[in-house]
Image (tube, helix red, strand yellow):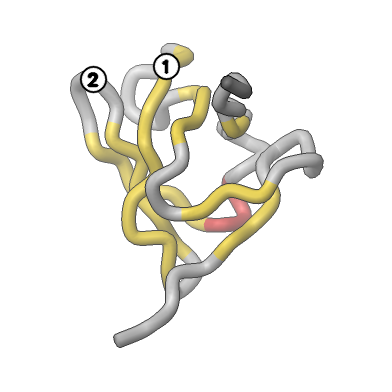
Amino acid sequence: MRKFDKIKDSTERNMIQSGDRVHHKCKIDGLYKEGTIHHMIGGSFAIESDRYRTLYNYNQVKAYSIIKINESKK
């Protein structure tokens, strides 16, 4: 079994990995949405939003403004 990757978001302040919630510009419809990162491995990952699951490459993080949503502290 392979270990999932971690990379920096478009702000380069936060690390994102599988299971993280993110804001992003959807590759399909061009709208800004929230979604969840899935299967971050081998240079690509998917973001599942309310309507689509879209595949992105690691080098597209800045182009689609993928920013991690930080969970509020309790």
At horizontal 42% and vertical 12% (from top left) the residue drawn is 31
Kindly identify which residue carries mark 1.
Answer: 33
Give the left or right position of residue 21, taking residue 36 as reference.
right
Check the image and name the residue furthest to the top.
31
Q: How many marks?
A: 2
What crowding class fits label 2: few (fewer than 14 Cα within 10 Å), some (14-19), or many (20 or more)?
few
Q: Nearer the viewer, residue 30 or 71?
A: 71
Q: Is residue 44 above or below residue 38?
A: below
At which x and y percent is residue 69?
Answer: 56, 26
The circle drawn on residue 50 is: 2
Determine which of the numbered discs, if any, sits on residue 56 in the image: none
- The percent coordinates of residue 55 (x first, y second) are 34, 48
Q: Amino acid at mark 1?
A: Lys
* Residue 39 figure quarter: bottom left
- Residue at the spot x=41%, y=31% of the render? 27
49 with respect to 21 (left or right): left
Q: Residue at x 59, y 33 (%)?
A: 68
In the figure, residue 70 lies in which quadrant?
Answer: top right
Residue furthest out toward the front: 74
